[in-house]
Amino acid sequence: MSVSPGNGAALVAPELPVMVGAVNGALRSVTVRGKAGNTLVAGVLSADHTQWRSKRGTAPGETYQVTVVAVGPSGATKQVTSEFSTQKATQTFAVDKILPNKDITGLTVGVGMPIMLTFTHGITDRVSVERNLMVQSSKPVEGAWHWFDDKSVSFRPKKWWPAHTKVKLVAQLAGVRGAPGMYGAQDYVREFEVGRAQISHADTVSHQMTVKRDGEVIRTVPLSAGDGGQWNHYTTNGVHLAMSREDVTTMTSPDAGPGSAGYYSLTVYDTVRISDTGEYVHGAPWSVGSQGNSNVSHGCINVSPSNAKWFKEVTLIGDPIIVSGTPRQLDPGNGWGHWQESWPQWLRWSGLRSGFTTEALSAVPVSDHLTQQTDTSKRRVTS
């Protein structure tokens, strides 16, 4: 019988699995228990009952007792007990924010909604972390994680989420190595649901926004987009996502301060934010005469007050709003511009490349250990 780590082993790397093997005979039971926390380590037994392997690593700074019961060819039972201890963590990391969440996005989202995680510390062992971020869904979806920087990783499907899909993120990060000497502090679970498929196309040349739900046009809205008098007054071209819905938004000029030429501060109503650089779909009673025939805004998509109120009310966070006809491209890092990258480009920044989601276990209750935080980052806004 073999047990790894061996009896008396010290300073074992927590990310290493516990493995047990029976040479002549079969394993009847394997128990791996942390002595300090009295926690059990789950494992998988091979079909022939000759090998056992832990499903995940162990906790740092813990001593484990391994108890193995095996049966020999003659039917005799043998029990072996051993102990090993893991090296201590010099630092721990946690998840600072997960989107979607109840407070910021709601838990029913649009078909373009990515799963976004922000960590408290920089991750250098991205593969180790990524392989412990499991996405389950009620409908099979091909997708992949993508690192924007050492603290930010997002999951996006290759294509839109199927409408009415239940999704569950299981982040098994407790004891996972994030960098030399740094390990995850705890696990996280987040469940959400994808709503109906609503996709809007805003054409800055025809000055119309077509809103489709489940493939059917539900409204065509006249618009006025960025006038292009300055480069940053073009509405950005590409696939945007609805990032927030606001009843009232104060918009200030991004390139002029109080007292300077071109400065403005406007209170606008019924807004849907689509980027981090101040672009919204919003009500603009001052440009109704231009909506449907010309572009006069400083970058936002102007619509009538009644259309703005309607659009805000029918939009879910994560709904795609696709802008066309402008030379200024939306940067993938601007807001939630995740869909601006082609699938091969997206995979370049994935440690494990693409894979299919596993089936969501809807009967498992949500256990969310993350403290929700409101996004208080300052935004430039334009009209």
Image: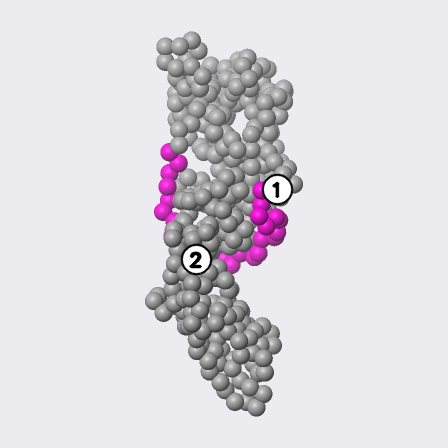
**Camera-nearest residue between 375 and 361:** 375
Q: Position of residue 307 (x, y in %)?
A: 50, 25
Magenta extent: 347-376
Q: Is residue 249 found left or right of 26 in the rendered image?
A: left
**Camera-nearest residue between 47 and 190:** 47
Mark 1 or mark 2: whose residue is earlier in sequence: 2
Report crowding for label 1: few under 14, some 14 to 19, many 20 or more residues within 10 A (C-alpha): few
Amino acid on which the number 2 mark rests in the picture: Gly
Looking at the image, the residue that sits furthest to the left is 36
Report crowding for label 2: few under 14, some 14 to 19, many 20 or more residues within 10 A (C-alpha): many
Q: Position of residue 61 (x, y in %)?
A: 38, 61
Looking at the image, the residue that sits furthest to the right is 344
Q: Position of residue 257 (x, y in %)?
A: 39, 15
**Camera-nearest residue between 9 and 383:** 9
Up the image or down, 338 lies above or below 37; here it is above
User: Circle 1 sits in a helix, a strand or a loop, which is it?
Assistant: loop
Up the image or down, 295 lies above or below 272; here it is above
Residue, disc 1: 348
**Camera-nearest residue between 193 and 227:** 227
Residue, disc 2: 175
Can residue 156 be seen from the camera position used here?
Answer: no
**CA–CA distance between discs 1 and 2?**
27 Å
Q: Which residue is rendered at x = 41% and y = 49% of the image?
A: 93
Q: Position of residue 130 (x, y in %)?
A: 53, 50
The reply to whether the magenta stretch includes residue 367 is yes
